Image: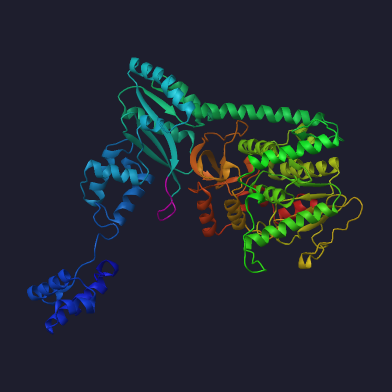
Amino acid sequence: MAVGKKLSVQEINSLRIQAVKLRLEGKTLKEVGKATGLSTPTIIAAHKAWLEGGWSAVLVRERGRKPGEGRSLSAIQEQDIYVQLVSTQPADHGLPFLLWQLEAMQQLILQRQQLDLPERTNAQYLQRWNLNADRPAKRMKQASSNVQRWYATTYLDICEQARKESASIVWIDDFGAHNNCPGRLRHGILRAVNNRGKVYWQPYEGSLCAAHLEDFFDRLRCSSEGKIFALLAAMQWQRAATFSSLASDSHDRLRLFHLPAATEMLSQSNELASSILKTAQDVSLVPKNTYARTPTSTKLDPMASMAQQLLKHQFAQRFDLTDSYSWQHPKQKTKEKSVVLTHLQRLEAESIQAMREVVAEAENPVMLYSIGKDSAVMLHLAMKAFYPAKPPFPLLHVDTTWKFQDMYRFRDQMAAKLGMDLLVHINPEGLEMGISPFKHGSQIHTDVMKTEGLKQALDKYGFDAAFGGARRDEEKSRAKERIFSFRSDQHRWDPKNQRPELWHLYNTRKNKGESIRVFPLSNWTELDIWQYIYLENIPIVPLYFSAPRPVVERDGTLLMVDDERMPLKSGEVPMMRNVRFRTLGCYPLTGAVESDANSLPKIIQEMLLTRTSERQGRMIDHDSVASMEKKKQEGYF
C-alpha cells in the first residue's frame, strides 16, 4: 500500500534508498513494495533514477514552497518596506510624492530592494498590510441603513455639487498601524480614498493633533487638481477648534461632509448629557426616605401580585431568559454517586452559597451594580441562586454622571429585561458643586461622587449588606479583604480587624449600625470571568469588544472621547483606533487598550497572554501610594 503522502520527505528518501537496494539484491517489485510500502511506479522511478544519476538522484526534494518563498519580497524585505510606509514620508526617501500612494510604494521598493514589481503585486501587498481600502460604493453595501439612505439621497446632492465646482470627492479615515514590527510602532495613518479606489495615506507619530490634519489636507489638496470634497465617517475632528477654523478658512479649497454615523454620535452625546442633567435634578428633588425605583410598578393585592409575578416569570422563561439561566442547563447524568465539579463550577457554587448566606442573615441586602463584566457575572449568579424567583434584593447604581453612553443604555436594558428593581443614586451635594474629573481631578471626583455617594445611598435606604463585584486578583488591597467584609457605622473598613472564613463558614453577626460588604467573586480571576461569560452566554457592554473608537492619548493612556463634555487640549484631535476596555468606569478615568479582540474567544486568548492587571487602565488606582486601600478604609466599595 502506498504511504508516501503520510510520510515526511526524509522518511520517503530512506524508503526509496531501501527499495533500490532490494532491487539490486534481485527482489521482485511485489516483494520490495511489501517491505517498504511504496507503490510500484515509485519503486521503478527510484531504481531508474539510480541508474541515471547515482544515489543522489534517488532523493526527492521538499514539496511545496517554503514560507515566504515565491513572493516578490522576502519576509525581511517585506517588513522593511512596511515600516517605511507607516513611519516615514515619501520626501524622506527623495521621492517626488506629497503623500504615499501605489506609485510611491513601487519606487520605494525599487530604490531599497532593487525590485521592479508590477502594479498588481504592489496592490496585493497594500491589501495584506491593511493600507488599501475597498471602493466606497462597495463599502456602502455593508454600511448601516442610515448610511445607505444617506448614500442614496444626500450623497447624490454632494456629487452634483462636486461636478458643478469641479471638485474631487475623497473618503477620509484614520486608523493605527499594526504593532508587529521591532520597536513596537506607535504610528497612526490618515487615509484618503477616491471613488475609483485610489488610496493616499500619510503616517503620523503619537497622538493626532490639528497640525497633522492641516498638513495632510494641504498635501491632499496639492496632489489634486482642484477643490476637495472630503467625506468623514464617524470622525470627531469638528471637536478640535483649530481644525474647524482651518476648514472654515479653506472653504474655497476644502469642504467637509460628515456621514450619519458621526452626526448621530454627536446628537446622542448631547441627548445623553441632557438626560443625565435631568435625572440628576429629579434625584435631588426626591425625598430622602423614598425609593427611586426604575421601573416603577403599581400596587396590587397579595394574590394579584403573586399571579403577576408567576405570569411574568413564565413569560421570561419562555422568551427572555432562554439563553441564560440555570433551568436551560440540566444537570449531567452520571453513573457514579459523586460528581466532580470543574474549576468554574466550584467558583459558581461558592459564590451562590455566599449570596444565599447573606439573604438568610441580612435584613435589607442590596447588589451594587456598576454595569461592568463583574457585575454582569454577579447578577447572572444571583438569577441562578434564587431561581425561579427573582433575587430578593434590588440593584443599586451609584451614578457619577460620567459613565460611558453604552453603559447607561446597557443598564436600563438589563433592568427592564430581568424585571429587577434598579435604584439610581447621585450625590446631590457633588452635583450642586459641579464635581468633575476634569476640573477637580480623579481623587476628589472619586471621593465625592463614588465613596460619599455610596455611603449616602446605603444610609438612605437602610441597607445592611451590599454585594460587590471586586476580585482579589485586581489590586493589592482587595487581595487581603475577606469575602464578608465588615464596616463600621461610619462605613469604614479596618484591614487589621477581619474575621476568619475557614471552610467557607461565615460569621455574619454584627453590631447595630454596622454593615457588611460581600464579595462573591473574591476568588475569581479575570480569566475565570471571561471563560464563565463565554460558557454561560452572559450579555456584556459592547465596550469590552474591540471596535474603531475616537480616542486621544494623554500621559500614555488612550482616553475615549465619549461625549461633548470632554475638553480637548489646544491642537488635540480625536483619532480613530481599534480599542477595547478591560475595565469600565467613568470614561475620563478609564484607559482603553489597542486590540483586535472583537469576540469572546479572542478576548480569552488575549487574557492567556497578558501579563498586566486590568486595573492599570483605571486612573483612580494611581492617585497615590496605596490609594485603593485608603479609599476602602474611607468607605469605597
x, y percent for residue 306: 80, 39
What secondary structure is the magenta-colored segment mainly? loop
Q: Is residue 34 above or below residue 263?
A: below
User: Which residue is more in the foreground, 32 or 6?
Assistant: 32
- Rendered residue at 34%/53% (across/down): 79
x, y percent for residue 289: 87, 35
Seen in the image, is 75 located left or right of residue 297?
A: left
Q: Which quarter of the rendered picture does the N terminus lie within? A: bottom left
The residue at the far top in this view is 164
The residue at the far left in this view is 52
Q: Is residue 573 above or below residue 271?
A: below
x, y percent for residue 205: 44, 44
Seen in the image, is 512 located left or right of residue 422?
A: right
Q: State the image quarter where residue 604 is shown.
A: bottom right
Magenta highlight range: 177-184
Q: Is residue 99 above or below residue 528?
A: above
Seen in the image, is 298 located left or right of residue 238?
A: right
x, y percent for residue 354: 76, 57
Q: State the image quarter where residue 299 is shown.
A: top right
- Rendered residue at 77%/68% (across/down): 503
- Colour setup of the view: rainbow
User: Which residue is more in the foreground, 248 or 31?
Assistant: 31
Q: Is residue 424 visible?
A: no
Seen in the image, is 67 located left or right of residue 211?
A: left
